[in-house]
Amino acid sequence: MTNNQPVVRFSVIGINHDHINSQVNLLLRAGAEFVSVYAQEPDLLQAFTQKFPQARAVSDPRQILEDPSIQLVLSAGIPAERAPLGIRVMQSGKDYMSDKPGFTSLAQLAEARKVQRETGRIYSICYSERFENPATVRAGELVAQGRIGKVVQTVGLGPHRTKLPTRPAWFFIKEQYGGILADIASHQCDQFLFFTGSTEADVVSSSVANYKHPQYPELEDFGQILLRGNGGNGYVRVDWYTPDGLNTWGDGRLTILGTEGYIEARKNVDIAGRPGGNHLFVVDQKGVEYIDCNDVFLPYGQQLVSDIVNRTETAMPQAHCFLASELALKAEAQAVRLS
């Protein structure tokens, strides 16, 4: 943010997922001002305001929605409640950033698209596995430079650890969390569109299963999608099987196949290899290169702040944001249930 650019003021409504912490921090890094927060749960609110004491706790979300000085509202509320809130935010003349998933049904998405067209406001989804992962950001820079030629396919793997004792009730209710493809796989759908440059895409096939957790019949713990776009192809696999023996919540990986080489991002861990996360491996016609991405700049926060001030789409085109969600929701809706 330049010295003469106005400071963007933002507030938070809904803190049911810890992703809200990184959403707030990326805006603070961009120079935005955190004004206020609303949450229904006193215990969550107390812990949150200890992390961010500059934010004033309010007793009614209308105190945020009706405050003309606030330009942006963030939310990591219960997934099914994020889109209805986003619609209210846009109708209040403000921009919105949701944690993923930004929607849990195609009906929610259709209404949000309608209201966004009517209001001209920004509906952004913080796809943290791209925006907040340095290795993925660096991979995007290399692809844009033509390092591996034309991208023809992405393979996105999104394993997660369940941590069952820590999960709230809504985590096990499909109407509330949306399903594994609508939820976790929205990350991989976003990356597929971004790296292939696809502006149109279809779900070729999809499937889900609950192989490990029969005590929670509405929980899906495995899912996969085959995607086809006008810029390339994609495969997605997500699951809730990360073993406790791994020192991170999931061995997230992204492989980008090009006509002149390929890139693999090992986002969180290089198992039995280098310590820490943010590892990038590049194979091209000249050889094999390892890139440590821990110092890569993450531009999403600054870009979003600039978009709010200048009414541009540098952080993420609005059409891309909605299409990534549409693919995940369609995959969920048409998924074959595996036994």
Image (spheres, helix red, strand yellow):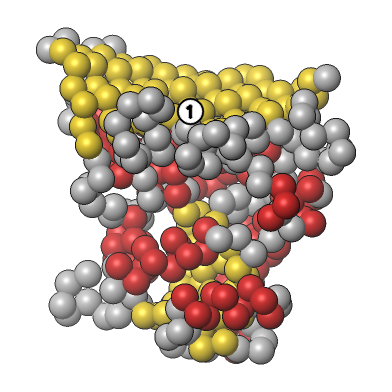
Position of residue 148 relative to residue 329, above or below, is above
Q: Is residue 96 visible?
A: no
**On-image quarter of the C terminus:** top right
- Badge 1: how crowded within 10 Å, few (<14), some, or many (20+)? many
- Residue 266, image x, y percentages: 37, 31
Q: Which residue is mark 1?
A: 156
Task: Determine the residue positioned at 24% across, 22% down.
Answer: 282
Instruction: Point out residue 160 in the picture as x, y percentages from the top left corner.
Output: 58, 38
Q: Position of residue 256 (x, y in %)?
A: 36, 23
Furthest residue toward front:
245
Q: Position of residue 248 (x, y in %)?
A: 48, 41
> Is 69 drawn above or below residue 320 in the view shown?
below
Locate the N terminus by quadrant: bottom left
Q: Is residue 85 left or right of residue 176?
A: left
Q: Please tell me whether residue 199 is drawn above or below residue 319 in the rendered image.
A: above
Whether residue 291 can be seen here: yes
**Quadrant of residue 207 within the rendered picture:** top right
